[in-house]
Image: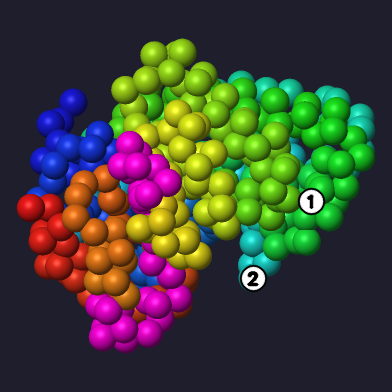
Amino acid sequence: MSVLKNDSILRTLRGEKTSYTPSWIMRQAGRYLPEYRATRKNAGSFLELCKNTDFATEVTLQPLDRFPYLDASILFSDILTIPDAMGLGLHFVEGEGPKFSHPLKDESSIQKLDIPNVEEELSYVFQAVKSIKQALNGRVPLIGFAGSPWTLATYMVEGQGGTDFLTIKKMAYARPDLMEHILKITTESVSRYLALQINAGADVVMIFDSWGGVLADREYEPLSLNYMKVIIQNLNLMGYENTPKIIFTKGGGQWLHKQAKSGAQALGVDWQTSLSNARQIVKDKLTLQGNLDPAILLSNPKAIEGAAKAILDDYGIGERHIFNLGHGITQFTPPENVQCLLETIRDYSPQFHI
């Protein structure tokens, strides 16, 4: 295995000293890049892009080739690979996003839900991890990921994204037994999935809890956070305690004090939460990742520079900060604005690492 030439993110996750604040961008391989759009066209479909090892490797490396100041790569895949492996019939509708042909709409389909043969059904993901790792040749660490059980369940029950979550919330309140079954099966599946990504070469794993923030305050722990904790515990028991784990609940800043006890090494923070407040909560015992509003990248260099500096100022002097967006980059972002952001971070952040 290649020795990492740039391990600044791994050092930051361990709380060790770095000479600047490292950064990567959620959805950094994506539609805002013309080279990605060209590869996506060649692939024919988004799923083919994910399932073809060569294409997945190519698009994972595209942002690194364009932006030399990125400090990590992230596997090009989708959080819905697991429900797809469960036979729910994932497909993408142009302009509408992901949909399932066989969502979990009745009790019998939920009772039949079982852990898929992750190693076999999702072998294309692990092949991509191996291929990307080889192509990186030690440039930067590789981040593997999965959706949180709650987030996956929302898609599996609602049948698509962009909903009001009333179907799954009704189930959670009226039939907690069915909800628990879905979440337990999904938790076990995610645990195996992330373990196999680490085996294939992922240096860090991240759990995206994209929809945890829609839960009522008293439901967040029992329906979302507790299952992410189990995944972290499972990975540690499987021998991956030294692989850093990041959890990110979008819209979940009010629960950072609870997330801090999850066993994760880092917490993702969205733009609705002050980093200095978050830092006081975690007391520098955990790394914080975030938290620029992605919409700022649609503006202009002066605004981007000011916003990036404000976030670095807000975190202040010290280690344990990975600069990122507070959610995925929008497809309408001009690539030169990303370059401006990354240059600002690299130029301005060394003063905080004295």
Residue 47, given in percent of the width and then of the height, sits at 55, 50
Q: Which residue is mark 2?
A: 95
**From the viewer's perspective, is the residue at label 2 or at label 1 nearer?**
1
Mark nearer the N terminus (2 vs 1): 2
Residue 320, given in percent of the width and then of the height, sits at 27, 45
* Residue 118 in view in this figure: no
CA–CA distance in space, label 2 to label 1: 18 Å
The amino acid type, in three-letter code, at marker 2 is Gly
263 vs 59, left or right, is right
The amino acid type, in three-letter code, at marker 1 is Glu
Q: Is residue 341 above or below residue 328?
A: below
Residue at 75% across, 61% down: 163
Residue at 46% across, 65% down: 271
Residue at 15% across, 57% down: 352
Residue 236, given in percent of the width and then of the height, sits at 43, 18
Tag 2–tag 1 contact (CB < 8 Å): no
Residue 17, given in percent of the width and then of the height, sits at 13, 42
Mark 2, other Cα within 10 Å: few <14 / some 14–19 / many ≥20: few
87 vs 270, left or right, is right
Look at the image and say whether residue 296 sits in the magenta stretch.
Answer: yes
Q: Which residue is mark 1?
A: 158
Disc 2, SS? loop
Residue 110, by quadrant, is: top right
- Which quadrant, please, contains the N terminus? top left
**Res. 23 mark:** none
Judging depth in this view, the residue of 207 and 157 nearest the camera is 207
Disc 1, SS? helix
Mark 1, other Cα within 10 Å: few <14 / some 14–19 / many ≥20: many
Q: Which residues are magenta?
A: 279-306
* Residue 275 in view in this figure: yes
Residue 349, by quadrant, is: bottom left
Judging depth in this view, the residue of 62 and 266 nearest the camera is 266
